[in-house]
Image: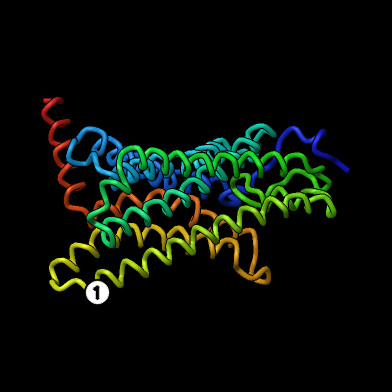
Amino acid sequence: MPNSSSVSEFLLLPFADTQELQLLLFRLFLGIYLAALLGNGLILTAVACHHRLHTPMYFFLLNLALLDLGCISTTLPKAMANALWDTRAISYQGCAAQVFFSVFLVGAEFSLLTVMAYDRYVAICKPLHYGSLVGSRACAQMAAAAWGSGFLNAVLHTATTFSLPLCQGNAVDQFFCEIPQILKLSCSDAYLREAVALVCSVSLAFGCFVFIVFSYIQIFRAVLRMPSSQGRHKAFSTCLPHLAVVSLFLSTAMVAYLKPPSISSPSLDLIVAVLYSVVPSSVNPLIYSMRNQELRDAVRKLYGYMLLRNQ
C-alpha cells in the first residue's frame, strides 16, 4: 500500500465527465473568478485611494476583500487549469499549499468577521467611546490578530494532516485539496492526531460565533431603543451587509460540513464545495456595495477617473 513518502501527486475530482462540459464550466468559473477579482479589487482601490473611507469599518472591509481574493485564488485557478488541459493532477507540495492557504484564509476571515461585529457593536452601543476603543492602533492590532490566528491554525492543521501516512491511494474526491478528503486517504487509525487540532479549531470557531451572536443581540437591543426611525434605519443599514456576509459564510460552511453522510456523493460534494469556496468571495463585494452609498460613490469616482485617464 502507498504511504505519504511514495505519493508525489494527488488526483483531484474533475468538474465533469466530458471534455465539452469541462470547457463549458471552465468559461463559467472564469467569469466568476474575474468578477471576484474585479469586485474585490475595486473595494481595495476605493478604500485605499479615498480619504473619506479611511475609517475602521472600511479598514476591516479592505482586509476582508484581501482575504476573499486569497480564498478564491487558492482553489479556483488550479481547478480551471485542470479543466482546460483535461488533467486531474496536483503535486504533493501544491496540495499541501492549497490546504495551508485554505485553512489560513478561511480561519482569518472568520476571525475578521468577529472583529467587524465588535466594530459595529462599539459604533452603535458605545458611540462616545468609539474613537478610544477602535482607534487606528487597535484596528491594526485586531486585524493582525485575525490574520495571525488563521496562520497558526493553518500551520497546525497542515503539519498534522501531511504527517499522516497515506494508505488509500491518491485520488481526492474534491476539486481542490481539503483536510477531510486527505484524511480519507490516511490509515484508519492515524487520523486521531488531527482530531486534537480539529477540537482546537472548533472551539475557536464556536467562541467567535458566540461573540458575533452576543454582539448582534446587544446591537438590536440598542437600535430598537432609538427614538427616531431614521436613526434606526441608519444603524441597521451599517450592520446588514456584515450580517449578510456572516450568514452566507456560516450557512455555506454548515451545509458543507454538517450535511448527513447518507446524502453525500461526489457530485453533491462538488456542488457544495463550489458554494462555500467560490460564492462568498464573489458575492461579498456585491453585498457591501448594494447597501453602502459611500462605497458606491467612491467606486463611481474611481471609475470616472479611470475613464478620464484613458481619454
Dot 1, crowdedness within 10 Å: few (<14), some or many (≥20)? some
* Relative horizontal placement of residue 247, taking residue 188 as reference (left or right): left
Q: Secondary structure at mark 1?
A: helix
Please provide percent x and percent y for residue 77: 50, 38
Amino acid at pointer 1? Leu
Up the image or down, 27 lies above or below 283; here it is above
* Relative horizontal placement of residue 240, taking residue 152 as reference (left or right): left
Please provide percent x and percent y for residue 140: 38, 38
Q: Residue at x 33, y 53 (%)?
A: 119
* Relative horizontal placement of residue 52, taking residue 96 as reference (left or right): left
Of residues 22 and 51, the one drawn nearer to the viewer in this rendering: 51
Specify the quadrant of the image occupied by residue 89.
Answer: top right
Of residues 37 and 124, the one drawn nearer to the viewer in this rendering: 124
* Relative horizontal placement of residue 83, taking residue 306 as reference (left or right): right
The N terminus, quarter of image: top right
Extreme residue in the right direction: 1
Please provide percent x and percent y for residue 4: 80, 38
Q: Residue at x 24, y 65 (%)?
A: 236
Up the image or down, 50 lies above or below 233; here it is above
- The mark total stands at 1
Of residues 188 and 113, the one drawn nearer to the viewer in this rendering: 113
Which residue is under mark 1?
A: 224
The C terminus, quarter of image: top left
User: In the rendered view, how is the structure colored?
Assistant: rainbow
Please provide percent x and percent y for residue 208: 49, 58
Q: Residue at x 21, y 41 (%)?
A: 53
Up the image or down, 226 lies above or below 69; here it is below
Specify the quadrant of the image occupied by residue 135.
Answer: top left
Of residues 304 and 164, the one drawn nearer to the viewer in this rendering: 164
